[in-house]
Amino acid sequence: MNELQVTFGGQSQSFEPGQTVRIGRSTDNDIVVTDPTVSRQHARLTWGPSGWLFENLGLARTFRQGQNVTQVLLSQPTELSLASPQGPVVLIQPPAAAGAEAAWPDDPRDTRVGGPPEVPPGDQAGHPGPPAHHAGAAPRADHGIPVAGGLAMAFEILVPVKSWLTDAGWRQGLRLLVIVYALLPLVFLAIFSSSRSLSTPGLAYSLYIAPLWAISFWLLLRPGKLAATEIGIGIGIVVWVTVWLNLITVNVNDHLVNGLRSGNFLAALAVGYNEEITKALPILLAALILLKYRSTKLDVRMWMLLGTVAGLTFGVLEERSYTEVAIAQVASSHAVSQADAGVLDFAFRVFVDGFQHAIWAGVSAFFIGMAVNYPRRRWQLVLFGVSIAAILHALNDWSLSTFNSYWPWIVIQAISLLLFIGYTMSATSIERQVRRTPLFRGDSILMDVVRPDDTGGSWTGWRPGSS
């Protein structure tokens, strides 16, 4: 009757003496806890002469009633929090102990792991113990603790700063991100309050918003693990877009701006291609270089994510001029409606302009990824993907200069979003169909067995000319 019961997530499992019960994030554990703060091999339970013993194994810690523990000899039902005092809770129930031991309360004052609390003097026979205090003694709170000590203990329990500072939960980037995003607007105010450039707020807040959109795209695409290769490509894309936009894109647009303002669709289309090529070129070059020198193909969803990085970079750089105009409009407005329009335009540019560029670049990057992976229709696929983005971009700009209404603009944006989100959902399915279609692959398609799965990652171990 020494069976151990372990409960996590509402499901209980039983284990016999002699078994080793492994707990952790890895799927080969007996108790799998998927929380990212939990170690892959977090802990184990073993049976010994003294009963069941819990041992913490991983870098992440284990807590019992808020206190860090490394070993617990289990003599009663015990709740253990993994990774942090607020982390996932595992309930461990050893065999019921005989007599009064089975009813021992789980008292945080108990210094003996798994054991019962001390019995106050005099209570064993049912007689009252010594008085809480006597004449001349310091006033004492319940359980014989001095008032000052009791207050300090209560404060430590209610505001456990030491526990917070050493908590493994800080390894989660989300908590740090919350702190950064709460403080940055105040930091902007402190640093830029004396700035004389109207583009400063737009640049600051565009950089503030862009990472949030990047996280959103990551969650939508689920492109697989970001390794050093992908991070390096992302940095290269940011540098490329920054340099190319300032040297080439802006100068080309300067020759087209008058036609764009007069409602000329061909001028808008030229601007669309000019700006979408700026974002698409680094994706295409990175994919071809990776293919030639590393014999590696990335999943199309990874290229979509990197495309959104190019779009967000473009948007951040572009928003400086738009937000400057919006702030100037607010400053010079004598009517409330004009001031409102300026403020709303500033908000739109900061929050959504980079996002717009990102979704167009993400769509073209999807087709670039397909083109590199299946070279028989390479340049047709590249042209098709860039053209989709460029035409949507052109319609967006043209509608603003042609219609005295925002609604056509909203419709075009809705279509753009529909396309992008559609590709995030069906990228793998479309790519799988292309892989099986001779129209795209030819007769020498890379065999399916080379590709590990359809969940992301890289394709390696083949020669560039084999597909």
Image (cartoon, helix red, strand yellow):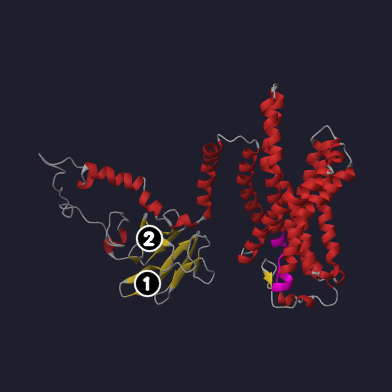
Q: Considering only vertical position in the picture, is 55 above or below 252?
A: below
Q: Residue at x 83, y 72 (%)?
A: 441
Q: Residue at x 64, y 44 (%)?
A: 206
Q: Would you name the residue on which mark 2 appears?
A: 78
* Predominant secondary structure, magenta span: helix
Amino acid, disc 1: Asn
Across and down, in percent, residue 69 comes to 35, 62
Q: Where is residue 50 drawn, in percent x and y?
A: 30, 72
**Residue behind mark 1:** 2
Q: Secondary structure at mark 2?
A: strand
- The answer to which of marks 1 and 2 sits earlier in the sequence is 1
Seen from the viewer's position, the closer of residues 384 and 150 is: 384
Residue 297: which quarter of the image? bottom right
- Residue 301 falls within the magenta-colored stretch: yes
Residue 398 relative to residue 319: left or right: right
In the image, the segment drawn in magenta is 290-303
Q: Is residue 25 left or right of residue 229?
A: left
Front tag of 1 and 2: 2
Q: Quadrant of the C terminus?
A: bottom right
